[in-house]
Amino acid sequence: MIYLYDGSYYGMLSCVYEHYYTMKANEIYAVQLFEGSLIDESKFIVTDEVKAEKVELAIKNKFSSNGYMDMYRSFLSDEPNKDNYILQYLMAGFKMGAKIDRMYSEPYVIRIRELSRRVGFESHRFLGLLRFVERKPYLYARFEPDSDILTLIGDHFADRYKNERIVIHDLKRHKALVAYGGEWLLYDVDNQELLPEGSEDDELETLLRDLWKGYFDHIGIEGRKNLKLQQAFVPLKYRKHVVEFN
């Protein structure tokens, strides 16, 4: 049996619940990524928050905190087969508990850790790469990360801009994080609703952008330029929304 779900975290955990309490799953996929199977029957699992929360609690009780976060960050990755790595990881972890942290040679553990590191590195990188513009009454930033990292950066920016209304817009996934007073929420959005429109502050915003780009151009020492190292820290794919490179 192949279980399909709506692409949400609780949707995936609902499939894990069905795997244990209804029928074992051979594979799990987000429905939008499933290309069909000539061999196995497929079934769409409706997200059930109660069931998903039971699975989530069981994972937190059975795994170490690092093990849980490795699993969660892996889910946020753009790896098409991530759900099946997670299923293998959870099946083993429910049997051996926190000992799974030391299973360095198991392929599914290796893969989960690779995905976790990749997602964690990208989220950390964007703590310094996001650029906000003032669009009254809020500060607005947009980006297109490889992984679905809004939940990983939410606490940082909500705390950093505690006294500001901020919107961080993931154009790739049509989602936005909205924060104020140290709290944040996620919303599904139509990208057209959040694209910054013209305002009376456009002239000031253009001036500030030009000043920042001028600083960026002149602060460097010509003899110490290292474009290859610069690209390692700020890959080309991220520069679209970084004002210094526009």
Image: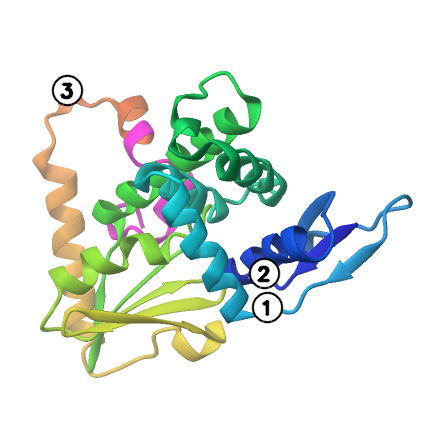
Identity of the residue drawn at 57% across and 41% down: 82
**CB-based contact (under 8 Å), mark 1 and mark 2:** yes
Q: Amino acid at mark 1?
A: Thr
The residue that mark 1 highlights is: 47
Earlier along the polypeptide chain: callout 1 or callout 2? Answer: 2
Identity of the residue drawn at 31% across and 42% down: 65
* Disc 3 to disc 1, C-alpha distance: 54 Å
Relative to 67, 179 lies left or right: left
The residue that mark 3 highlights is: 224
Q: Amino acid at mark 3?
A: Arg
The stretch of residues the image draws in magenta is: 232-246
Q: Is residue 4 magenta?
A: no
The residue nearer to you, when weighing 225 against 170, is 170
Residue 46 position in % (x across, y down): 65, 69
Identity of the residue drawn at 24% across and 56% down: 131
Secondary-structure class at tag 2: helix
Q: Is residue 245 magenta?
A: yes
Dominant secondary structure of the magenta stretch?
helix
Q: Within the image, what quadrant is residue 175 found in? A: bottom left
Earlier along the polypeptide chain: callout 3 or callout 2? Answer: 2
Secondary-structure class at tag 3: helix
Identity of the residue drawn at 31% across and 79% down: 198
Disc 3 crowd, CA 10 A, few/some/many (<14, 14-19, 20+): few
Task: From this view, report whether residue 163 is shown above or below residue 158.
Answer: below
Residue 14: which numbered mark, if any? 2
Relative to 196, 45 lies left or right: right
Disc 2 crowd, CA 10 A, few/some/many (<14, 14-19, 20+): many
The residue nearer to you, when weighing 163 against 144, is 163
Q: Is residue 54 visible?
A: yes
Residue lying furthest right: 38
The residue nearer to you, when weighing 147 against 49, is 49
Q: Amino acid at mark 2?
A: Ser
